[in-house]
Image (cartoon, coloured by chain):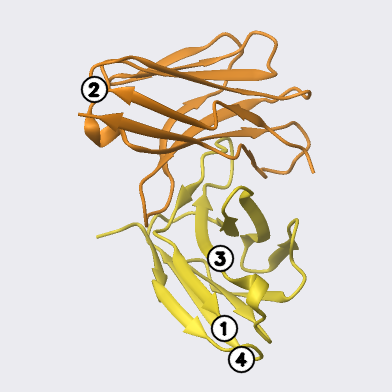
Chain colours: A yellow, B orange
Amino acid sequence: DADVTQTPRNRITKTGKRIMLECSQTKGHDRMYWYRQDPGLGLRLIYYSFDVKDINKGEISDGYSVSRQAQAKFSLSLESAIPNQTALYFCATSTAGGSYEQYFGPGTRLTVT
Amino acid sequence: GQQLNQSPQSMFIQEGEDVSMNCTSSSIFNTWLWYKQDPGEGPVLLIALYKAGELTSNGRLTAQFGTTRKDSFLNISASIPSDVGIYFCAGQRGGSNYKLTFGKGTLLTVNP
């Protein structure tokens, strides 16, 4: 079974709709991250969380919110989706200390029409 | 934000050839990571480097942490068709609170 899972894998939604992307991990890692990937722009950090009570904004947090429901679960919400939020979204995890290695989920392809 | 310059942007090679790609920055990094992303999947960690000058291998892949700490290199020997994908470098700078900076990737195509 995959260590980092994301649901849904694909989603098409309309402008103005609220949508939630979910991430779960069985790696036992404390730290979780949300990225978006756009062609030619690479991976950009949206939000990150170092534990359940610690949430931090990344480079491009406007239009997004997150919730860390448990150590193993970190969800990303788009309160009112817009077309330029069409992208690949990845969740990643890392351990609490010493290692900077991040492990990624399979991604969610989101299309906003 | 801080950028990593990754080159080349794309490569077309014949099966069996060796491949080299690199990542450079104007800033010093404490950690370099190399990832591979297959179409429709998330990046998979290939190699992690933690010390300047460090040379680490993973099968046919070898990566080096540049001695200036501003660059890193990835080599793939005797390429095979399943090496096709996008290779990303990522770096962690001191004081960045465990956040990574990513390069934009090198798209590798291997012709059988």
Q: What is the x, y in percent for residue A83? A: 64, 77
Q: Residues within 10 Å of mark 4 (few under 14, many from 20)?
A: few
Q: CA distance from mark 2 to mark 4?
A: 47 Å
Q: What is the x, y in percent for residue A98? A: 58, 35
Residues marked 3 and 4 touching at CB (< 8 Å): no
* Mark sitting on residue A113: 1
Q: CA distance from mark 1 to mark 3?
A: 12 Å
* Viewport quadrant of the N terminus of chain A: bottom left
* Mark sitting on residue A87: 3
Element at badge 2? loop
Residue that numbered label 4 is attached to: A17
Front position in the image: A8 or A83: A83
Q: CA distance from mark 1 to mark 2?
A: 41 Å
Asked if both marks, 3 and 4, belong to the same chain, the answer given is yes
Comes first in the chain, label 1 or label 3: 3
Q: CA distance from mark 3 to mark 4?
A: 16 Å
Element at badge 4? loop
Q: Quadrant of residue B91?
A: top right
Residues marked 1 and 2 touching at CB (< 8 Å): no
What is the three-letter code of the residue carrying label 1?
A: Thr
Give me the chain letter of mark 2. B
Comes first in the chain, label 3 or label 4: 4
Q: Judge left or right: residue B5 versus residue A14.
A: right
Residue that numbered label 2 is attached to: B15
